[in-house]
Amino acid sequence: MFNDEELALIWFDYNDVSFSKTEKILDEFDKIDAIFDKNKVKSAIFKENDLNEIKEKLLKVDKDEFLKFVADEFYKYNIFAVTFVSKNYPEKLKNIDDSPLVLYTRGDAGLLGKKSISIVGTRKPTTYGKIVVEKFTKELSSAGLVTVSGLAYGIDTCVANATIDAGGKTIAVLAGGLDSIYPASNAGLANKIVETGGLLISEYRPGVKPQQYSFINRNRIVSALGLGLLIVEAGKTSGTMATARHALEQGRELFVVPGNINSIQSEGTNNLIDEMPDTFTISPERILYRLKIKKKKEETKSVQVGISDNQILEILSQGELTFDELAEKTNMKPSELSAELIKMEMFGLVMKGSGNTYYKI
């Protein structure tokens, strides 16, 4: 199941030993798995009291008993673990600040080694934000990129759903143990991600509940896993802005979609574009070009567009309109307009928003 080195790191994690303290302890040993050698542990000398407390715990641990405990725990929650010394630990996480010692996984851990794009944004997106993130997610996913987000309300949820709808794979990074899906309303979506070949990951072991700090910590993993970070709608002081800072520090490409200048959901994104104009992004093609990803060839699908359809599209090209406004401008009967709009939605020409409004896609 695990070699002794991997088991050692899992032991440190289950005993709440931080990455920095783990490094200090391992400096006393020639190999990581030496922590299970009682004689070597006894001869180790630590000046710090908290390290000596960990030493006392190590003198009492039974490796075989701990391995059995881990095996039972992982079977119970249907999870696995990728440690810092595992062959499939993602290289993109090894060079960030405070790399997670262990990643607990459910689903296809092989996705950690695939080319990915991280997509984040507000928990309260506007209709515009939802339309944009769905369009970008589907096109980037269709190009072969794995999407990465956080399974939170709003944009994160849109990313996961849009990826699945496009037949792609997505990674959701949780802020608590994999037995604590948050928000609870996304438990069904979490299962769907795994069932469709995606992956759930967390640096927190089972039993650890999400805390305010853990959502902040989670951001560095979300940004690091992608070749780049795409932001769609974010407030001025939102957690998304922290994720943007992580991405820049980690040397990731940053892509920002502009939003309504009067919307508080777009204050952060518009400020980022103002400060870093090169992040301005209005098409998935720009992202694929910057990341050197070739778009997969698709079969061209012809859509028969009638006179009424053309009229509606021409009117909507000037901006969103309510059903009543469309009826007035087109001079169409409500029943005829309704039928046309339903057909156009099916063909992906328009989309219905909140308040019975319609948008051209």
Image (tube, rainbow, N blue to C red):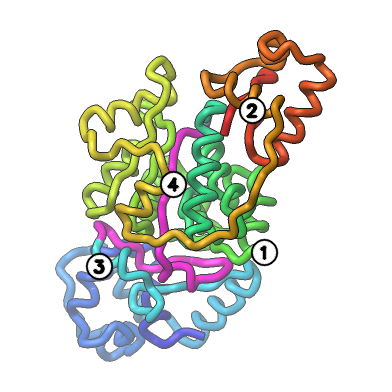
**Identity of the amino acid at label 3?**
Leu
Mark drawn on residue 44? none
* Residue matched to label 4: 119
Residue that appears at 65% across and 20% down: 357
* First reached walking from the N terminus: tag 4 or tag 1: 4
Residue furthest right in the image = 335
Residues at marks 4 and 3 touching, judged by CB atoms closer than 8 Å: no
**Whole-number angstrom distance, CA of label 2 to CA of label 1:** 40 Å
Residues at marks 1 and 3 touching, judged by CB atoms closer than 8 Å: no
Quarter of the image where one finds residue 288:
bottom left
**CA neighbours of label 3 inside 10 A, class few (<14), some (14 to 19), many (20+):** some
Q: Is residue 165 left or right of residue 289?
A: right
Q: Is residue 88 above or below residue 63?
A: above
Dot 2: what SS?
A: helix
* Residue matched to label 3: 51
* Residue matched to label 1: 195
Quarter of the image where one finds residue 40:
bottom left
* Residue matched to label 2: 310
Front one among 87 and 295: 295
Residue that appears at 57% across and 20% down: 320
**Identity of the amino acid at label 2?**
Asn
**CA neighbours of label 1 inside 10 A, class few (<14), some (14 to 19), many (20+):** few
